[in-house]
Image: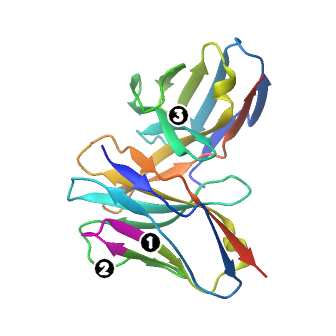
Amino acid sequence: DAGITQSPRHKVTETGTPVTLRCHQTENHRYMYWYRQDPGHGLRLIHYSYGVKDTDKGEVSDGYSVSRSKTEDFLLTLESATSSQTSVYFCAISVMTGEADTQYFGPGTRLTVL
Amino acid sequence: AQTVTQSQPEMSVQEAETVTLSCTYDTSESDYYLFWYKQPPSRQMILVIRQEAYKQQNATENRFSVNFQKAAKSFSLKISDSQLGDAAMYFCAYRSVLSGTYKYIFGTGTRLKVLA
């Protein structure tokens, strides 16, 4: 347990509504990530952050935005949710272990867009 | 761009037997890290094992070991003495050393069933 929480854990929303998912860490790690997990695709990186107010796009960033105003919080926003964004969303942090980092994951958020 | 391929969508193993999950990757880099993660039905992603590409010795963690073949770009996971609790999705992941962003690339996963 790397002290990562995600909220909400489950959410059902309607197409066109805005949605914000929150990732919170307790250990002040610099790197944070948002992934989505879909059958047949594994985990795909949406956005990541390498510090407060420092963020960059991953491979599936269209339709998503992120913000990081504090080290401990990384927010993922769907400005106008679509059914294709129905997925399980994972937050992760990078923790230095020995010579390299290892990513540790939050418990996930299941989002359903109707 | 790097890619990670897990060609076995699903595998089964008898309890107490040994099973090997395959992973291949494509990269032009010489230094990188490889990982295996386990995702049980609880959905929590759990690190199983990590391998540094510059190390020739295969990593081991209790009943889990890897067969790292750098020239073949292969990174298989062997689970010995399989237990019912090993039933899960297993993901292989690659991380470039050069990227500086600590981004991981994941395979599509292999679902392991353990038969009693």
Left or right: where B78 falls relative to A109: left
| Secondary structure beneath label 3 | loop
Left or right: where A81 falls relative to B106: right
Mark 2 touches mark 3? (CB < 8 Å): no
> Which callout, 1 or 3, points to the residue nearer the camera?
1
- Chain letter of mark 1 equals B
Disc 2 residue crowd, few under 14, some 14–19, many 20+, Cα 10 Å: few
The answer to whether A62 is drawn above or below residue B102 in the figure is above
User: Which residue is tagged 3?
Assistant: A72
Quadrant into which the N terminus of chain A falls: bottom right
Residue nearest the viewer, comparing B81 with B45:
B81
Q: Amino acid at mark 2?
A: Gln
Q: Residue A71: give x, y in percent of width and height.
A: 47, 31
Residue at mark 2 to residue at mark 3: CA–CA distance: 37 Å
The quadrant in which residue B116 appears is bottom right
Residue nearest the viewer, comparing A9 with A73:
A9
Instruction: Name the residue: 26% across, 72% down.
Output: B55
Q: Amino acid at mark 3?
A: Glu
| Count of marks overlaid on the render | 3
Give the magenta part as a residue range.
Answer: B68-76
- Chain letter of mark 2 equals B
User: Which residue is tagged 1?
Assistant: B76
Instruction: Name the residue: 48% across, 30% down.
Output: A60
> Which callout, 2 or 3, points to the residue nearer the camera?
2
> Which callout, 2 or 1, points to the residue nearer the camera?
1
Instruction: Name the residue: 78% across, 22% down.
Output: A114
Disc 3 residue crowd, few under 14, some 14–19, many 20+, Cα 10 Å: some
Q: Residue A39: give x, y in percent of width and height.
A: 64, 46
User: Which residue is tagged 2?
Assistant: B57
Q: Residue B68: give x, y in percent of width and height.
A: 35, 73
Q: Earlier in the sequence, mark 2 or mark 1?
A: 2
> Is there one chain holding both mark 1 and mark 3?
no
